[in-house]
Amino acid sequence: MNLEHLNSEQQRAVTQTEGPVMILAGAGSGKTRTLVSRIQYLMDDHKVSPYRILAVTFSNKAAREMRERVAAQSKVDLGALQVTTFHSFCARLLRIEAQYLGLSRNFSIYDASESKSIVKSILGKYGINQKELHPSSLQYYIEGLKNLGYYMGCSDEETLEDIDLDDEYFKFFREYETELHKSNAVDFGSLITAVLNLFENFSEVLERYQRKYQYILVDEYQDTNRAQFRLIKLLSQGTKNVCVVGDEDQSIYSWRGADIRNILDFESVFPKYDLIKLEQNYRSSKNIIEAASHVIGNNVNRKGKEMWTDNEQGESIRVLECRDDKLEAQFVGHEITQLIKGGSDPNEIAIFYRTNAQSRLIEDALRKIKLPYRVVAGIKFYERKEIKDLLCYLRILVNEKDALAITRTINTPVRGIGARTIRKIEDEAIKLNTSLWDMFHRINDHYDDYKHLRLSTKVKSGIRSFLHILTECQVALTDGTLPSQVYEKLLAESGYLEMLNSEGTHEAMARVENLDELSNAIKQYEEDEEEPSLVGFLETITLDSETETGEPGQGQISMMTIHGSKGLEYEYVFLVGAEETVFPSYRSLEDGEDAIEEERRLFYVAMTRAMRKLYICFAQGRMLWGSVRFNGPSRFIDEIPEDYFEWDKYEGAGVLSGHKKTRPSSSDYDDFSQETHFASDEVTYVIPETKATYKFPEGTNVAHQLYGPGKILSAEGSGGDEKVVVKFKDGTKKKFLVKFAPIERL
DNA sequence: GTTGCGCAGATTTTT
DNA sequence: TCTGCGCAAC
């Protein structure tokens, strides 16, 4: 195989096929090219069967891209080559081996919003008010355990070290797992942990897969969580042929469980591994690379890579100071117009922001001057209510035990079976130790036996028609009717379509259109797949919900969050909202240095997407949460050395002023750390209280006798009246009067 | 069982 | 400012 198109480090990364390898690949260092070559090299030069290679990435997008690129250049039959995501890989494996875990292979997969519903119903059952324990903090806790690789009955010592089984939340975790199991369902997290469970407790299964996968590749290694790490460790135990590729400077998902230890511990698990650094950047100008390197150099938690490039020096980074957020949006629109006039391709222009909410003003501005744009990843198609409803109907056809799907659909459209009734039937089902579905059947067949439930005849007939339509569809499915046809039948006979049509509103019509789209999606799936099945379709859409929002390459400017930009590149990048509390976000400012470092990596990711020119914009005043706030420019702008940027003020109407090659002195912004409220036309400044001396000033780490360790978010009042707001480990915040509260400094 | 008001809360979101 | 959710009244 010809490796001439690769530099020497890349070549090493391709040809070092045996034994453990860690590749630290900087932004724009030709990582994908290298990985694709490595796979080809294995198949061509080492005659490794594609069946023996497993390549896992995080996103379907990345998996698809890699697969296509391998396919484009290879003559080998790729049917067996697994380039997939962690989750799809595990789902597939679990369907095959489900019986070991007491699951059946038609299990449902619950997404985040569905696990939240389960969490809520558990809290409801315990009568816990959401003020006492917020469902999302419990959900976060449960997710956290799974990210660490814990499953019920797990006895792995290292995992047990990480978790606290005496935690008061643990009983909810157990409850949650039971609930899932009863529904023959798994959530995203347990897709991974269930496979761990399988491997750790059924060695014959593990050995089978160890023999099968002789070469393992892990992309985006910096984003793996503990569970995934253990999975890789187990799978590769035999051959030790594991190659991980990552960039610690681009780790931006720690809040999803990404664990830096996976990089640090690699050596102890895989001693004598080869470390290869890809440090040459082929993407961006020198100015951009050097500036970005300076910024990221402020992070302490790094393995240390020095990026460099042979590319030209390029143009200076442009920092744009705007009076407010509207002008910022206007500037972006104005500048893009100039670029396009100058012959630039709109497809090569992107606008990045920290939060989705920021897109609105920019969209308004672009629309106003008629610039075509597309927003990448906004509201997801499959998260729409009507789509969810129908998917739940379909799920019941496959998995009757799916209680969540049943409770969601039983009364949509209205069949006179409300929450109370469902509750009653659920309780009865628990009493009789049976499923909700079976309970419905019993009531339907022997109504008189359940007189004590006091179910009205309306309820009875509601249940009857619900069961009737679903059973008919099930029969149709087993008779070999295509999923798409069953879907149409369901849509018509469940009364769902009728319900929307009779509403007649504009919104209802849009929903009908969405349901047509779902129909198309099923048909598309049937065409693409050799053996289409409803289970297969449902799995595909829960694990690969990426919707093609507008065709790229249609002369549109791209807009997205920085998280969404990872892995992409554009000639021109506009980073907006580079202000303290926006970027870095106010949450990270509260959470301390590690959180700031993650924000800095995010900033680094944003910068390194740009090939030719980078614009960094900020607004002096921004409408936030109902009032205009003056936050001052982001600290990350301060971290760019002056040699690399030019600073301008945008005054509106295309006028720039105050052009400098240096930054304004930082004291210029001291006045901005205030808050103003607009009441009608009058401007009232809210001057912060004169600094009092607090017993527990902001940022102090404290411990509360009852709630455990936490951090002071804010303090007010003086002396005996001092009150503090404490944020605890689980994310809850509480306010205390210092003289009474049992808190102490840590 | 459905509709409407009031209040809290407000990042990022590969799967 | 805007939204989403819980609870209270129909």
Image: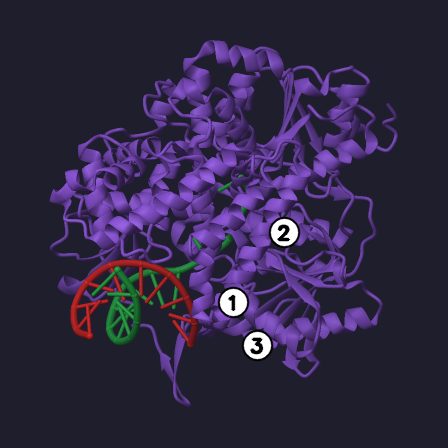
Chain colours: A purple, B green, C red
First along the sequence among labels 1 and 3: 3
Drawn side of residue A113 relative to residue A357, left or right: left
First along the sequence among labels 1 and 2: 1
Q: Which residue is mark 1?
A: A509
Q: Which residue is mark 3?
A: A326
Q: Position of residue A176 (x, y in %)?
A: 30, 36
Q: CA distance from mark 3 to mark 2?
A: 23 Å
What is the chain identity of the residue bearing mark 3? A
Q: Residues within 10 Å of mark 1 (few under 14, many from 20)?
A: some
Helix, strand or loop at mark 2:
helix
Task: Residue at 53%, 33% (x, y): give it.
Answer: A479
Residue B10, by quadrant, is: bottom left
Q: Residues within 10 Å of mark 2 (few under 14, many from 20)?
A: many
Residue A532, by quadrant, is: top right
Q: Position of residue A330 (x, y in %)?
A: 64, 76
The C terminus of chain A is located in which quarter? top left
Q: Which residue is mark 2?
A: A565
What is the chain identity of the residue bearing mark 2? A
Q: Is residue A5 above or below residue A202?
A: below
